[in-house]
Image (tube, helix red, strand yellow):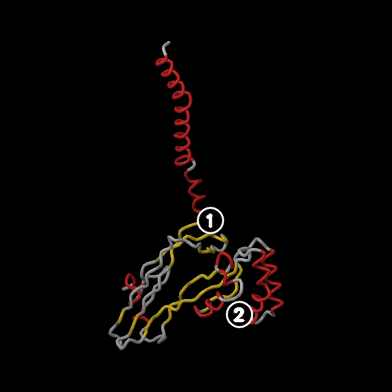
Amino acid sequence: MDIKNEVLVRVYILLFGIVVPIAVLLFVRTIMISVVEGDKWKKKGADVAVKYREIEADRGNILAADGSVLATSIPYYDIYFDPQAPTDKDFIENLDTLAHCLATYIDQSYTPGGYRQQLLEWRQDTTNRYRSIIKKVSYNTKQQLESFPLFNKGQNRGGLIAERAQDRRLPFGLLAQRTVGYIREGANPVGIEGYFNSVLEGEPGGQVMICVDRRRDLWKPVDDLLAIDPKSGDDIKTTLD
């Protein structure tokens, strides 16, 4: 056998002995994953701990003819603490001053010593990384909390988590309530709120978040350059006097 034929024989042996079996194996495995085990992997995908989640936009105001506000959205924040986020050094160095600030300005039912003990217990219990500090606070209170020792190191290093939500308010109460209307889950849209929902609701943003408590569906934002800020909805000025 000459050299050329010998090389061709070796190539054929390599092709049919290694490449073809691997290709067949990959094809069979692809069919298994996509068809036979499809439901199983879809379920696992739904349970993934990191997802790109929607951020709700600020809803526009509904105004009277003179500019008075008939309906507006008031933002508020639920504040949580991830006691496992800080390093041991950061946690110990800021423990006393953080406990003093929280007991003095946020929750007076604790003494500084009592809050210090609470923070230590949270740190030692690694089963819950979402400890509630205070709920439904204003933006100013959120800023105050972000200035506290340890919390001022940022979300990833300091462990402070602020979940933003909004509450729809009617400053004039029952006056023109039916005309102003509402948007509620499980109910038909009513009034101006319902008819002009596409104008008022704005455009949602999005950000990568990590699930820190699957039972309560609690998610922690991840610093990400791909985060998209929501666009606030437009205001509507009516002829209501």
Give me the residue at 58% from left, 75% from top: 134
The extreme left residue here reads: 239
Give me the residue at 64% from left, 75% from top: 98
Dot 1 crowding, Cα within 10 Å, few <14, some 14–19, many 20+: some
Q: Amino acid at mark 1?
A: Ala
Asked which quadrant contains residue 56, the reply is: bottom left
Lateral position of residue 97 relative to residue 42, left or right: right
88 relative to 23, above or below: below
**Disc on the earlier residue, 2 or 1:** 1
C-alpha separation, residue under disc 2 versus residue under disc 1: 31 Å
Q: Which mark is residue 106?
A: 2
- Image position, residue 16 (x, y; %): 45, 23
Q: Amino acid at mark 2?
A: Ile
Residue highlighted by disc 1: 49
Q: Quadrant of the C terminus?
A: bottom left
16 relative to 29, above or below: above
Residue nearer the viewer, 207 or 201:
207
